[in-house]
Image (cartoon, helix red, strand yellow):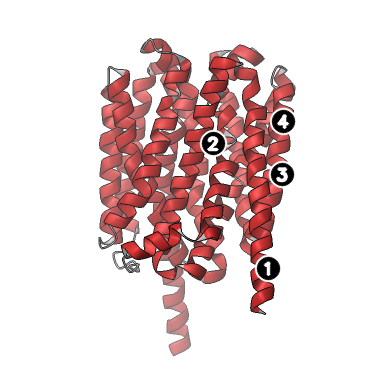
Amino acid sequence: MSSQTHTMSHSKEKSSGTLALIALAISAFGIGTTEFVPVGLLSSISDDLSISITLAGLLISGYAIGVAIGAPVLTALTGKMNRKMLLMSLMVVFIVGNLVAGISTSFGLLLVARFITAFSHGIFFSIGSTIAADLVPENKRASAIAFMFTGLTVATVTGVPLGTFIGQAFGWRATFLGVAFLGVVGIIASAILVPKDLKEAPPAKFSEQVKILTNGKLLLAFAITALGYGGTFVAFTYLAPLLEDVTGFSAKFVSVILLVYGLAVAIGNMIGGKASDKNPLKALFWMFVLQAIILFIMTFAIPFKVAGMITIFFMGLFAFMSVPGLQVLVVNLAEKYVPSAVNVASALNIAAFNVGIAIGSFVGGVIVDSIGLIHTPWIGAIMVLGAVGLTGVLMKMEKKDSLTNT
């Protein structure tokens, strides 16, 4: 009898865990859509507000900087807050930020609105990752984090092309108002499906946060995240202008190509989650090698429509494949070296993703202004090669440590 009751309570627990993961993924979808949706709207925003395409690119790098600053600072400040309450508050900030973006009439106000929205983004993914990991057994953690990030990938699959399509049909402001509505759906899902009694992480002391920043291996992991993930954004930020001006596609067709890119991202994320469950470092090394190769090829393929489409598909496949692995790598390293500050380490890694995006899109802007759009992919490949080198170094360090400890 008791084993039957135990099984029933276990399956009930499992289904409530799955529902909570779905709620997290829905919010992640809204947040992911808002981060990347300007990619497809850069041309229309720059025309409407009479600014250069490079200045419009700040809507992506500025947002990323907001995430990078907001994630570690707010994760540390809200350490004592109830997790569920915090999730709900973040979605409120998110909704307000997008509403302001949707009614802004100047580039300055739009940039400020993006910056505010970004604050909710970083901390959402850092606590979301740890909540997701806690909802499942130890050996399923990478897959649970990957599932939550599916929201982010589905955003790239459907949210960004759909946002681009809406923006082209009804004006870019309509897109931001639509994203605010997604936030409302997310907050309702979290209210209903996320359990109240989430495991509270002990608040990290400031001294422990400093410990993260003095741990060589964690710093190396953050640098790998920034370079490996950010390299793609040198080209991806300017994908719409690239496709219109270099490949010769019409603006209307850009949302279709973003859909193809998004599908590749979704496939890559699933493969990446499975591949990284066993040995994240080894998996990451090969993902970055392949991504660098694809970006080099893209420089030569992008002027041709068919070849360009194929390389964009592969760029999407490898661009996000590394995300679950990078997150798990940092959580594992933090549990090993600074167990009391895993949340903060997770937040710093989200910051690292966004520092990478900011560097990538900024570098892309400089390239566009100086030597031209066509050069963005191979410059991005150089950034990714930096991640290949650093991953190799970290693999050697870990191997050496495990030999020393045996």
Name the amino acid, label 3. Answer: Val
Mark 1 or mark 3, whichever is nearer to me: 1
Left or right position of 300 against 13: right
Earlier in the chain: of badge 4 and badge 1, it is: 4
Q: Nearer the viewer, mark 2 or mark 4?
A: 4
Is residue 332 visible in the rendered structure shown here?
yes
Q: What quarter of the picture does the C terminus occupy?
A: bottom right
Residue 191 seen in render: no
For discs 4 and 1, the disc positioned in front in the rendered view:
1
Q: Amino acid at mark 4?
A: Phe
Q: Please report whichever mark, 2 or 3, sits nearer to the chain's N-terminal start.
A: 2
Residue beneath the point at 40% across and 27% down: 59
Residue for badge 3: 289
Alpha-carbon span between mark 2 and mark 1: 40 Å
- Where residue 166 is drawn, which disc sits there? none
Total numbered circles: 4
Pointer 1 residue = 400
Q: Amino acid at mark 2?
A: Val
Q: Using the numbered discs, state the Cα–Cα distance from disc 1 to disc 3 in whole angstroms.
A: 23 Å
- Residue 329 image-quadrant placement: bottom right
Q: Read off the residue under disc 4.
A: 296
Query: Dot 2 corresponds to which residue?
Result: 157
Q: Residues within 10 Å of mark 3 (few under 14, many from 20)?
A: some
Viewer-nearest of labels 2 and 1?
1
Q: SS class of the residue under badge 3?
A: helix
Q: Earlier in the sequence, mark 2 or mark 1?
A: 2
* Disc 2/disc 4 C-alpha distance (Å): 24 Å
Query: In this orientation, which residue lies closer to the viewer: 372 or 176?
Result: 372
Asked whether the beta carbons under mark 3 and mark 4 sit within 8 Å of each other, the answer is: no
Is 69 positioned to the left or the right of 405 in the image?
left
| In the image, residue 150 above or below residue 247 | below
User: Distance from label 4 to label 1 (Cα)?
Assistant: 33 Å
